[in-house]
Image: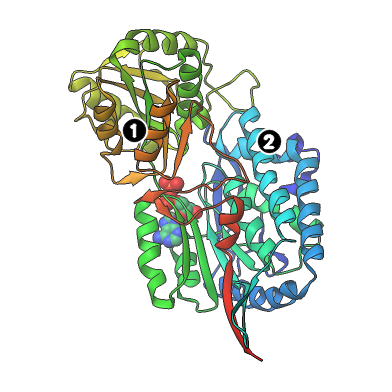
Amino acid sequence: VLRILDDPALFRQQAYVAGRWVASSNGKTISVRNPFDEAEIGYVPACTMEQVDEAIDVAKAAQILWARLPDRERSDRLRAWYDLIIQNQDDLARIMTLEQGKPLSEARAEILYAASFVRWYAEEARRLNGHVMRPDENRRVIVLKQPVGVTAAITPWNFPAAMITRKAAPALAAGCSMIVKPSELTPFSALALAVLAERASIPAGLFSVVTGPAREIGDVLLRSPSVRKLSFTGSTPVGKYLMAQSGETVKRLTLELGGNAPLIVFDDADLDVAVQGVLASKFRNAGQTCVCTNRAYIQNGVYEETCARIVKCLESASGGNGMDPSVTIGPLINEAAVAKVRLHVDDALSRGARIIGRELTVLGRVVLPIVLADVPPDALIASEETFGPVLPLFRFESEREALTFANATPFGLAGYVFTRNVSRAWRVSEALECGMVGMNTGAISLASAPFGGVKQSGLGREGGAAGMEEYIETKTLHLEM
Ligand code: ADP
């Protein structure tokens, strides 16, 4: 690893607890492997419960001092963190590709996206304003905005950097402290961000990265009354567990859970735009994003044409080691992910779907993009999130039918619609049961825009002003004069 980095100090095999770089207090470690070839990249400490407690205690003290700083000071330090992330983008991208597998170009794009949250919230740190009311002559009511306090984040492996900055930047901007428990599969990206936070003079203990056993660390964070808020991105079952456990200490929660995004192409769509949208929303990160299109509904009039164009565009897909600049599809994260792809493809074929274009091609953990046509509505892939590069195409006749199919899921994160009819665009956007709609676009991630889901896809929003509110408490001061 060290040989491929311009700044080897960004690669840390220690946790960053309470402002110090440490091994586990019991000496245990967790090995981290490259998903492409399973080669060991390194190890991280399996932090103990005492170390997590220490991180919480120090975060409490550090938060009080941080919240007292002038807004501009907090803003400037976040801005310094942003500048360092940008300066080190190549190394951060290399570390990410090594541990996560995505193509280097996508890793760099993620680093820029991750950095954009730090910049946006550095600016927002200076706009933490309350307001004053005058209910009658002798009374004023002052609404104060205060930081929530000590907060925690539990983050997944699919976006090892952006899922951290999307939480940490608004938390720090609002005057909170944060303890991050990154995925055990991708801890090095989190630790590299912590190196840069330290260099940016983010105070010791304000931002900790604890690595180690998920359940045990999660339980310490959950049980602590000092941790006032938890932000989680990950699977629905774990999110439900965290939500139930948070009840004990009445923590505030932001949950970004699984999706099952529908994409609808109407007969009146611009097909060039629609096909680009399908490809962008389906195959980024080899299909491993929570907003990936999981089901594509294509209206009968353009069905054959859309199928043909998608297959043509996918001919040039190149799978392999993400470090190779010509690769556009990296490996899936683990064997279970490959097994799920096989299951969904086999199930769909057994129910009458057919493969168009390339047959299912699996080389180690690399799965090349595959397209299934005429998938029946009862196929597993119509109700379960695949999290892999499989695109199932379903037919539909009417707008009403498309909406019924699209909304027939307990999830509601993203949805995509392609049409040139303005009335339909409004109607369908409003009727889709999801937190975000891409209208004639497959790209919906932006630091300044709220991101999040409805139904069982989650609670709360990240990004934009809404993402900052999640880290702010409101205090009401009644003043009689
Ligand atoms: P994914 O399918 O994206 O890996 P997970 O929900 O398993 O989704 O993982 C997301 C994050 O949640 C990871 O950081 C993981 O370590 C953590 N995690 C998994 N199980 C638990 C748990 N019981 N308590 C706390 N965190 C957990």
Q: Residue placed farthest to the front in the image?
A: 137
Residue 140 position in % (x across, y down)? 63, 82
Tell me the quadrant of the picture where the N terminus can be found.
top right
Residue 332 showing in the rendered view: no
Residue 157 position in % (x across, y down)? 52, 45
What residue does disc 2 label?
A: 94
**Which residue sits at x=77%, y=59%?**
75
Tell me the quadrant of the picture where the C terminus can be found.
bottom right
Mark nearer the N terminus (1 vs 2): 2
Give left or right: position of 28 versus 70. Answer: left
Examine the image and state in which quarter residue 255 appears.
Answer: bottom left
Q: Amino acid at mark 2?
A: Arg
Query: Viewer-proximal residue, 437 or 308?
Result: 437
Q: How is the image coloured?
A: rainbow
Name the secondary structure under disc 2. helix
Residue 104 position in % (x across, y down)? 64, 29
Query: Viewer-proximal residue, 275 or 100?
Result: 275
What residue does disc 1 label?
A: 339
Name the secondary structure under disc 1. helix
**Which residue sits at x=39%, y=76%?**
248
Q: Is residue 148 above or below residue 198?
A: below
Distance between the alpha carbons at the discs numbered 1 and 2: 27 Å
Q: Residues within 10 Å of mark 2 (few under 14, many from 20)?
A: many
**Which residue sits at x=31%, y=11%?**
301
**Which residue sits at x=74%, y=48%?**
10
Give left or right: position of 131 versus 386. Answer: right
